[in-house]
Amino acid sequence: MSDSNMLLTLLNKGVVDAIVKDDLEKKLKSGKKLRIKLGIDPSGADLHVGHMVVIKKLKEFQDLGHHILLLFGNFTGQIGDPTGKSETRAPKTQEQLEKNAQHYLKQVGKILDVKKVEVVWNADWLASMTFQDVIKLATHFTVAQMLERDMFQERIANNQPISMHEFFYPLMQGYDSVALKADVEIGGTDQTFNLLAGRILQKAYGQEPQNILTVPILEGLDGKKKMGKSENNYIGVNESPKEIYGKTMSIPDNLIVKYFELATDESMEEIVAIKKQLDDGANPRDLKMRLARDIVALYHDEKSAKEAEEEFINIFRNKQTPDQIEEVKFNKKDWNIVELINEAKMVSSKGEARRLIQGGGVKVDNEKISSHEDSIELNKEGRLVQVGKRKFVLAKLK
């Protein structure tokens, strides 16, 4: 792809807003190596495809030769960004955040060349600020500005509390841009207020205000809520090829084009062609299979994508179980079904197990489990346990 096409993709593919677009385009065409900032509070260790939308945009900057600043909020994360939250978020310790950040780096390395990324930690400058420094920052914002934020308006309408410390979060994120002399900051649309805070503070400190690029929020497998582990509607970056493939096949048809745009490397021309195919009556299943291959190949490889597709066809089109089912042996005979599938690592928690059982998503020997209180008896021949549409285990007594 030529530099001009890469630039066109950067500014338009999967972009909601560019502030200020003309100025950013001029800078990108100038040949100057820009400092591109992405701030992350690593409150969790496991990333999903929704997280990677902004990472893929960073990759586009990196491919054009710009300097990537991956800022981990080992200070701000202890406070928690109120963005999109209906209540005050529980704080994390600095040690938890830094441990999560290391896992985060391994996962973003599937997309970014992390050897060319500058990793920075905002405790390096925020932790040493005096109360006088903080008050100086606060003079650049009004209470009315803070209360304009949608999530605060929702809390006021619902008679929910807003803690004073939550007003300081955008000040700190904005000051990060001052400390790093960022030329561009990127983030999801839910971060717009915080990104604009960076422009305000850079101007106040005599710097040229950073440009901003915002990307959409990706809905999860339910097609309604933001992709997230707490909603159990996510496609995990570290999940197996068959899990990624199968989950992708379960997305609603109306999200096919959006997933191609935000979760794959397909060109804008190809995405337009895909939309036309759907409009002309193409079978959504066939396009989802292409989408699933693309996503698996992105986080694994082409061979894994092909194998995952073959297994998916084998299971769902031919109504068969996988050719190779993992055997798990247990020391005791009698098990509560929740404890068994949790012990077999077929779910991430007992809570997820109960939700799946309630939704009819757990079977033993092809019989649906009706209650989370049900028990099963293991034998040496094995019981076929199925969780969801894609996970199978042969549970045996040792």
Image (tube, rainbow, N blue to C red):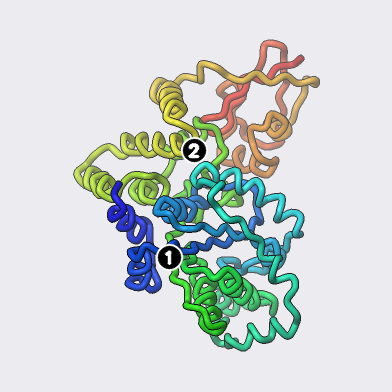
Indicate the position of residue 96 as horizontal and vertical percent values. Answer: 74, 54
x 55%, y 47%: residue? 114
> Which residue occupies the foreground of this view, 127 or 91?
127
Q: Please state the horizontal and vertical placement of residue 23, each as a whole percent of the image.
A: 36, 73
Mark 1 crowdedness (10 Å alpha carbons): few <14, some 14-19, many ≥20: many
Q: Amino acid at mark 1?
A: Leu
Q: Where, by quadrant of the figure, is residue 367 drawn?
A: top right
The correct choice, above or below, for 329 with respect to 44 in the image is: above
In terms of image quadrants, where is residue 157? bottom right
Left/right placement of residue 337 relative to residue 270 reads right
- Give the SS element for disc 2: helix
In the depicted view, which residue is nearer to us: 338 or 239? 239
Q: Is residue 98 left or right of residue 36?
A: right
Residue 168 in view of the camera: yes
**Is residue 224 shown to the viewer in this render?**
no
Residue at the limit of the structure toward the right, as seen here: 332
In which quadrant of the rendered image does the C terminus lie? top right
Q: Residue at x 47, y 48 (%)?
A: 222
Residue 390 location in percent, x, y?
52, 30
The structure residue drawn at horizontal position 61% and vertical position 24%, both measured from the top left corner, is 385
Label placed on residue 115:
none
The amino acid type, in three-letter code, at marker 2 is Tyr
Nearest the eye: 269 or 164:
269
Residue topped by disc 2: 299
Give the Cα separation between the discs numbered 1 and 2: 24 Å
What's the mark number on residue 213? 1
